[in-house]
Image (tube, rainbow, N blue to C red):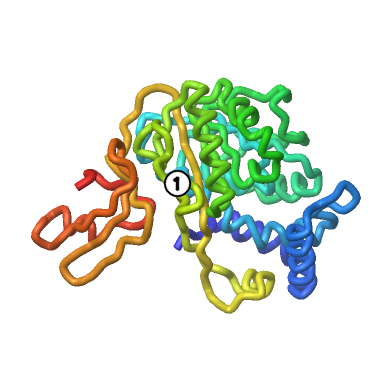
Amino acid sequence: MTLLPDDLRTALDSALARYAPHDLSRAMEQLAERYRTGPSAAAPHLRTPADIAAYAAYRMPATYAAAGAAMRQAAARTPGFTPRTQLDVGGGTGAALWAAGAVWPTLERVTVLEHDPQIIDLGRRLARTAPVRDVTWRHASIDPGLDRPAADLVTMSYALNELPSRRHADVVRWLAKDATMVLVVEPGTPAGWANIVTARQALSESGLTVVAPCPHDGPCPIQPGRDWCHFSVRLPRTSLHRKVKSGTLGFEDEKFSYVAAVRGEWSRAAARVLRHPQKRKGVVSLRLCTGDEGVRDVIVSKRQGELYRLARDVDWGDDWPAAD
């Protein structure tokens, strides 16, 4: 389970307490319908303060969990990376700045670019107790022509999919300018993964090295239409979140796709676990993305001793030390 930080959970609950749970639930139902039918200039997705609060309840815990999971994988491959500045593009209510502050305590200053002033207002209120205290919120739309501050770490979570696909590569190259690490997170769907494939290529063309999840810089070996690269993180639901999301379970699984790329040469995993390991008596079946042999299905048996013990503990999305 990935838990929100206590300070963020307290701040979010305080913001949600201004509204009756049934009002939040109704706002979320209306938001879901607008997202299905698509926004318009006259009727944007988020219209009222209640919409913003419902959006925060609906998406902030999941975004925090997914961004944090991706950041931890990136940090594991770059132990010498100690960022002091972050630029969060399309930052919403600030989930990624909270996640980055938890993964990289060296962060001192964050700039968040967000186009909705109501979202900025809530994000500012939530960030008063964030681990990074120097946070600047900038009201701006995502545009490669926009002047942006240089930053060690540049993040973009669940925002690339809101832009026309023809702009994706240019936007990602703009993210990579003057950045040491760029991390892009998208929904864990075939469309979200396709966006990540585009981002990955643009980052490589910008001179960055992909360090996660891919164990290589070559073309993605997964064939579109047959499979897609995505991962999952489990997070708890509070009673209020269950009411807002009309759910009964005490948890949810957030599926996401991501890419992290860094300037310079960095070590990479020999392979990455692409699916839940299938564990049976005496054997573990793994689907791996490898550095030199593409996607492989391997079976690790009890006879392999330490490797088998490692396979019993490995999870979906983890590094794997060897292709065999």
Q: Is residue 310 left or right of residue 224?
A: left
Q: Quadrant of the N terminus?
A: bottom left
The spot of residue 315 in percent (x, y) is 33, 57
Three-letter residue code for mark 1? Gln
The image shows residue 324, relative to residue 267, as above or below, that is below
Q: Which residue is depicted at the point 55% across and 44% down?
A: 194
**Image mark count:** 1
* Occupied quadrant, residue 14: bottom right
Q: Which residue is depicted at the point 68% across and 57% down?
A: 56
Q: Neighbour class for label 1 at 10 Å: few (<14), some, many (≥20)?
A: few
* Occupied quadrant, residue 314: bottom left
Q: Which residue is depicted at the point 52% across and 32% down?
A: 182
- Answer yes or no: is residue 84 visible: no
Q: Is residue 205 left or right of residue 136?
A: left
The spot of residue 63 in percent (x, y) is 58, 53
The image shows residue 241, relative to residue 95, as above or below, that is below
For the residue labelled by badge 1, is the local secondary structure a helix, a strand or a loop?
Answer: loop
Circle 1 residue: 223
